Amino acid sequence: MGDGRILMPYLSPALNVMVSAARKAGRKLIRDFGEIENLQISLKGPADFVSVADRRTEGILIAELQKARPGYPILTEESGLIDGPDKSHRFIIDPLDGTTNFLHGIPHFAISVALERDGNLQSGVIYNPISDDMFTAERGHGAYLNERRLRVAGRRLLKEALNATGIPFMGRGSADDHTRFIRELRAVMEATPGVRRFGSASLDLAWVAAGRFDTFWETGLAPWDIAAGILMVREAGGLVSDLSGGGRMLETGAVVAANEDLHPQILKLLKEAAKAG
């Protein structure tokens, strides 16, 4: 958990740029979110509106990041890879992680921005503009929520752990993926006091870093869903791996996050559940 001390987070020049870009994009997203309730009477309107809001938010982020760091490539959800001459750096951005929540007027979604340097995650921002929760992390300098230093929770036993996950859905994952998840869920349900599914992987990881969730696992994710969150958990003292226990989360789209005590336990549970099929 956070230790309660008010500390100033370390803001490198690059992280400062990322925070400013997220805040600027977030102001527009707040206004867009305010319009959603007016559109709910229409079957078609909200989904179209959210798609426009998603692209518009991405456009603001790209413009702000390119203005400050014009040579950096940018990997985005909507536009793919926007190339640049500086091959040692790369931004990875998700303009709206939690689209379905946004569509339904649920104020749980985030802007996620990560920066890689020479293939290593260097800086991360996860920002929920509705709650004004600004999670930041810098490699070697810790993770913060606004001005409070974050630490993963200290629970050591699965029987005490609150877990977060993402559920495969229509059009996401094969029938085998859905069946495997049901086995995983059953195993975690039987071993722990609670499972939550909140619908935003970046915030799930940020909440593990903040000690709100003890563990998080999900598959079928994209790099922009998890890049900033992986760094956030690591800098808060936690462990993050793929489902094999390796470090290929951005390639495999699978992630398991927890503190040092719980990570091997939840990983073993998930592996055994996967084999059970």
Image (cartoon, grey):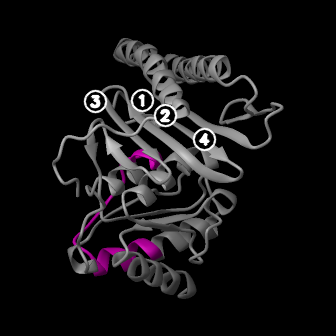
Mark 3 or mark 2: whose residue is earlier in sequence: 2
Magenta highlight range: 184-203
Q: What residue is pinned by disc 3? A: 131
Task: Determine contact: label 2, label 1, CB under 8 Å.
Answer: yes
Crowd tier of the residue under label 3, counting other residues whose Cα lies within 10 Å: few below 14, some 14–19, many 20 or above: few
The location of residue 266, given as percent across then percent down, is: 40, 77
Mark pair 3, 1: CA separation: 13 Å
Q: Quadrant of residue 193?
A: bottom left
Which circle's residue, 4 or 3, is located before the other in the chain? Answer: 4
- Tell me the quarter of the image containing the N terminus: bottom left
On screen, residue 75 versus residue 227, left or right, reads right
- Identified by mark 2, the residue type is Thr
Whether pointer 3 and pointer 1 mark residues with C-beta atoms closer than 8 Å, the reply is no
Q: Nearer the viewer, residue 137 or 247?
A: 137
Mark 2 = which residue?
99
The residue mark sitting in front, 4 or 2, is 4
Decide which of tag 4 and tag 1 comes sooner along the chain: 1
In the displayed structure, would residue 182 be above or below residue 132?
A: below
- CA gap between label 4 and label 1 equals 25 Å
Q: Amino acid at mark 3?
A: Ser
